[in-house]
Structure formats: structure tokens, C-alpha cells
Image (spheres, rainbow, N blue to C red):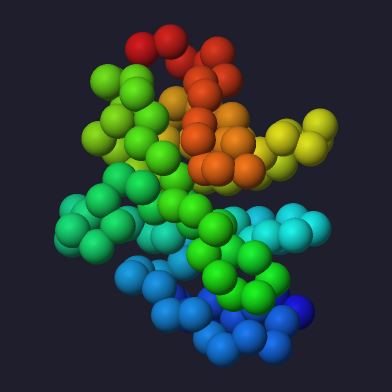
Amino acid sequence: MIWFTGSNLIIDDCEDISLATDIYSLLELKNMVIVVLYSDSTDMDKVEMRNVFAYNRKGEQLWQIKPQETLSTSSYSYVAMAEDGSGRVKVGSFWGGGYYLNIADGTVTPDGGRPW
């Protein structure tokens, strides 16, 4: 069972994982859990702009999302995450940029949406 309350993530029988800020959303995949942490201007010193994390079923952090290189959105946190129906995970930035998330290492590539 996987669930969260505030900034605490609970994965199966593991000890609760206390994160830097409240959890905004969670995506459960076969071998991992990906969380988006809530962030606003008061939280940026805690999670920077890299507020997406992956954990394995043992509760160990696998990665923190890598900085993406698009200048126009590199200074904004992520506010959305979903599977796109084909097994790929997409994340969205504060300004509407969409990115495919490589769940193996936390890197992102633009999805071809908003070109700025």
C-alpha cells in the first residue's frame, strides 16, 4: 500500500519517509513511486526547482529530477504529472511546458508542446 499525508510518504511496510515539503501528487508505477512536492516561493530553498523524486519499494530515493535545459522554464517548479496512456510519464512546469520524464534516471525532454 502506498499513500501520503502532508510531507510524509508511506510505501508498503517501510518506515515513513519525511520529505522537505508537502506532497502535491503521487504516481505509483510497478517498481517505483514518483512524487511531486508542493512548492511555492517560500519552499524553493528546500527543493529548488527540482521538486520531483522517485523512490523504490524499499523507500530508498532513486533520483531527484534533473535540471532541464530550456531557459524559459528552467526557473519554475513542476506542477503536474501523469502517464500519457502509452506508458510514458509526463511532467508539466509552472508556465505550461510539458516534458517526458525518463523514469530510469530523472532526466526530462520537451514533449514538443509550447515552444518557448
Residue 77 in the image: state x and y as whole percent. 34, 44
Residue 51 in the image: state x and y as whole percent. 39, 53
Q: In which quarter of the image is residue 85?
A: top right
Q: As displayed, is residue 21 above or below residue 34?
A: below
Looking at the image, residue 12 sits to the left or right of residue 5; the answer is right
Residue at screen point 72% across, 35% down? 88
Q: As displayed, is residue 23 above or below residue 41?
A: below
Report if residue 110 is visible in the image.
Answer: yes
Looking at the image, residue 46 sits to the left or right of residue 58; the answer is left
Residue at screen point 79% across, 58% down? 30
Q: As displayed, is residue 25 above or below residue 107?
A: below
Residue at screen point 28% across, 21% down? 72
Report if residue 40 is visible in the image.
Answer: no
Residue 13 in the image: state x and y as whole percent. 70, 88
Residue at screen point 36% across, 36% down? 67
Of the 4 image quadrants, the one containing the N terminus is: bottom right
Of the 4 image quadrants, the one containing the C terminus is: top left
Q: Give the mark count.
A: 0
Residue 104 in the image: state x and y as whole percent. 63, 43
Of residues 57 and 20, the one drawn nearer to the viewer in this rendering:
57
Looking at this view, name the residue that lies furthest to the top.
115
Q: Quadrant of residue 94?
A: top left
Q: In which quarter of the image is residue 39?
A: bottom left
Q: As displayed, is residue 41 above or below residue 75?
A: below
Looking at the image, residue 83 sits to the left or right of residue 99; the answer is right
